[in-house]
Image: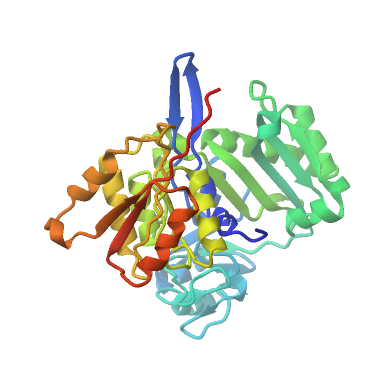
Amino acid sequence: MAASVACQAAVRGLRAASTKQLLVSRNQLVRVSPRRWLNLQEYQSKKLMQDSGVTVQRFFVADTASEALEAAKRLKAKEIVLKAQILAGGRGKGVFDSGLKGGVHLTKDPAVVGELAGKMLGFNLTTKQTPKEGVKVKTVMVAEALDISRETYFAILMDRSCNGPVMVGSPQGGVDIEEVAASTPELIFKEVIDIFEGVRDDQALRMAANLGFKGPLERQAADQIKRLYDLFLKVDATQVEVNPLGETPEGQVVCFDAKINFDDNAEFRQKAVFAMDDTAESDPLETEAAKYDLKYIGLDGNIACFVNGAGLAMATCDIIDLHGGKPANFLDLGGGVKENQVYVAFKLLTADPKAIRASPISQHQHGHLCNGAHFPCAWLSGPGPRSTKPRITRSSAPALKPLMLTEQCLADRRHIYFMFWRLKLKEQ
């Protein structure tokens, strides 16, 4: 299926639903289930970069129009850029319900910054990536506007094929790197980083030269590259992407815009970073699921899915779609799930008003992903008399056949159907 439902879910963060397995010893296998991916606002990423010595624009953050005006005066810049802080892209072409057009504005007058901030803060900004009603803007960033004479692309990311971090760069920045890779692959440069040595001076200088920096700027760019790698290690990042890494007419190398992805399994030692997580714009059900290490992604359909195993969850979504239905969610309990997590998962499903209570439940009966006794126990331990609970029907039919039960659920929204798909794994 070219545009499968599973692919749609994957685009929205399905990587968080995967389960990593680490072999600790010959007889011990430990599962590490990643949490929901961390979301940081632009100013928070810039602050992390600034703290690591990476050159960024001077900026202040404001929560009120008066604070924005004061910040603009303190900058004493020739030109000021005011940016609404939301997690969605396309802010520049967005529209506020206050009537203001654009979430990014340039001006040379600090007084105008205060006026614009008053039309941004407390109002909803709608872009191509936000819900129809938009997202309320609670914070704005007031920054020094710098001219860019040349734009390049630079990133540090984890690469499975190299078993570690790599640097990727291109002299063609400011555009989607995928377009550059497709049209002019010879302009993509890659350097594998030795995790014991780090970024060597010759590697940093070679990458700076490949990005097109010349003379004193080459050494300056190499220094920024090394500082970015220090940040990559310091915050346990899986990716630090700078687009553009720009050159100014005054002879500065500046990181104008950056995206940082973090290893969620490092939360225990990155308390300060993860404390900045902004969940205000996230789906409340997804946020609640993350508290219990459940992988929940809301979809547009009306058939609820309750699945054990990320791969089976994707297959369940695709099979429902194949038979003319539309899944309301992706929900993977993951390995080692406990009774309280199953109970919370039930609550998440029943909290979705658009979802018909037909829940294909895939469980590895012979794979030992989880204890099957947790399912009925979680159901029985819920509040309220048993007579008010949704009725449970258990089916041990093959995987495709139970899907016919979803037609029955269209007529009765009170039912939850347990469909245990018995998958016998061949012994190795």
The residue positioned 43% from the left and 40% from the top of the image is 422
Would you say residue 197 is visible in this rendering?
A: yes
- Quarter the N terminus occupies: bottom right
The residue positioned 47% from the left and 62% from the top of the image is 327
Work out whether residue 402 or residue 58 is closer to the camera in this orientation and state it: 402
Above or below: residue 284 compared with residue 312: below
Above or below: residue 38 compared with residue 196: below
List x then y, in percent, for residue 415.
29, 62
Q: Quadrant for residue 220, please give it.
A: top right
List x then y, in percent, for residue 226.
67, 35
Q: Is residue 102 left or right of residue 273?
A: right
Q: Is residue 186 left or right of residue 227?
A: right
The residue positioned 31% from the left and 59% from the top of the image is 416
Q: Determine the residue located farthest toward the top in the rendered image.
A: 26
List x then y, in percent, for residue 104.
58, 71
The residue positioned 46% from the left and 36% from the top of the image is 265
- Quarter the C terminus occupies: top right
